[in-house]
Amino acid sequence: MAPIIETPEAAVRLARAICSDLSLYNEAKIVQGIEQDSFFDLLKDELEEGRELYRSRVSPALYDRTNFFERAIVDVILRRKGSVRSKIW
């Protein structure tokens, strides 16, 4: 079992790595979700699985007082798909 992450820097790296994997393995679904403004509904299960993995690896105190995983969703998945046509941007 991997050690529990205690530092903000390591937690950010983990969140970004998980979201990078989500982006890599769910490209078509992400594009569809952005185009149809249904990203969070369409990827609900995948995002929850990633969030649970993140939660299991980060200390509870750090998890409870930060939003690193949610920020990584925006920065790593959504922002990188800014060229996808969407009515939301």
Image (spheres, grey):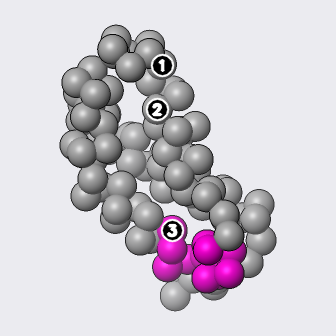
Q: Which residue is mark 3?
A: 54
1 inside magenta stretch? no
Q: Secondary structure at mark 3?
A: helix
Residue at the image position 55 percent from the left and 77 percent from the top: 57
- Residue 62 drawn at (x, y percent): 68, 74
Q: Are marks 1 and 2 in contact (CB under 8 Å)?
A: yes
- Marks counted in the figure total 3
Residue 52 located left or right of residue 9: left
Q: Which residue is mark 2?
A: 78
Q: Residue furthest bottom?
A: 1
Q: Which residue is mark 1?
A: 82
Query: Toward the viewer: 37 or 11?
Result: 37
Residue at the image position 40 percent from the left and 40 percent from the top: 23
Residue at the image position 46 percent from the left and 32 percent from the top: 78
Which image quarter: residue 5? bottom right
Q: Does 7 appear above or below 12?
A: below
- Residue 36 drawn at (x, y percent): 22, 24
Q: Does 75 appear above or below 34?
A: below
User: What mark, if any, has residue 31 been given in the picture?
Assistant: none
Look at the image and give the residue range highlighted in magenta.
Answer: 54-64
What is the crowding at mark 2: few (fewer than 14 residues within 10 Å), some, or many (at least 20)? some
